[in-house]
Image (cartoon, rainbow, N blue to C red):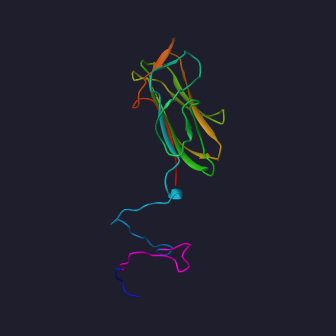
Amino acid sequence: MADGTLKVGTITTSSGSGTITLGQSGETVDMANGSITLNSSMTNTPAFSAYDASNQTIPNTTYTLLEFDTESFDTDSAYNTSTYKFTVPSGKGGKYLIGCAIKTTASTDRLILRLEKNDANTFYSETNSDSNGSGQFNLLMDLSEGDHLKVAVYQNSGGNLNLEGGSGTNNFYGYKLT
């Protein structure tokens, strides 16, 4: 067959339903000249981002659940602003990028973020805090339907320490990788 341009209004299968295959293994299909709508299995969802709307006090030398009480977005209603947990929705298990970033109102010698999966300690990110008093992590995780995640923080400033509230300061976020 000769190279050329195929112009059509609609492509359907001969049976009216099923799979339409464009190209073969090893070939690239270029769709750069138009907009593409992906089905739900090809998008990075579920996805969420939550933050604390006001300052939160973190006691000295105690792990404290971070209260991300306001959502920036939540594609699948999987983040709970009352329990501060993200729960993998039904049928949405897979690989996820999960992250958290916080900033305190003062520095501390030690700042530890702890990611908890199903109420078990899963991951620690420790920062010898500088004058910014900040900490963060990003990690890839395998999550199954029903798994839930939350974040706790530990600090040892010698007294209570506040996290700065507001949408751009302390965030807990994640999304499923396609």
Give the number of callouts.
0
Q: Nearer the viewer, residue 39 or 178?
A: 39
Q: Main secondary structure of the magenta part?
A: loop
Indicate the quadrant where residue 112 lies. top right
Farthest left residue in view: 33
Provide the residue span drawn in magenta: 6-21
> Residue at the spot x=55%, y=73% of the render?
17
Q: Can you give x and y, in whole percent of width and height, for residue 178 in the image?
A: 52, 55
Left or right: residue 69 versus residue 10 is: right
Q: Quadrant of the N terminus?
A: bottom left
Residue 148 higher or lower than 27, as above or below: above
Left or right: residue 4 versus residue 165 is: left
Q: Can you give x and y, in whole percent of width and height, for residue 71 in the image?
A: 47, 35
> Residue at the spot x=64%, y=42% of the render?
147
Farthest top residue in view: 159
- The verdict on residue 13 being magenta is yes
Q: Nearer the viewer, residue 97 or 31?
A: 31
> Residue at the spot x=59%, y=30% of the render?
83
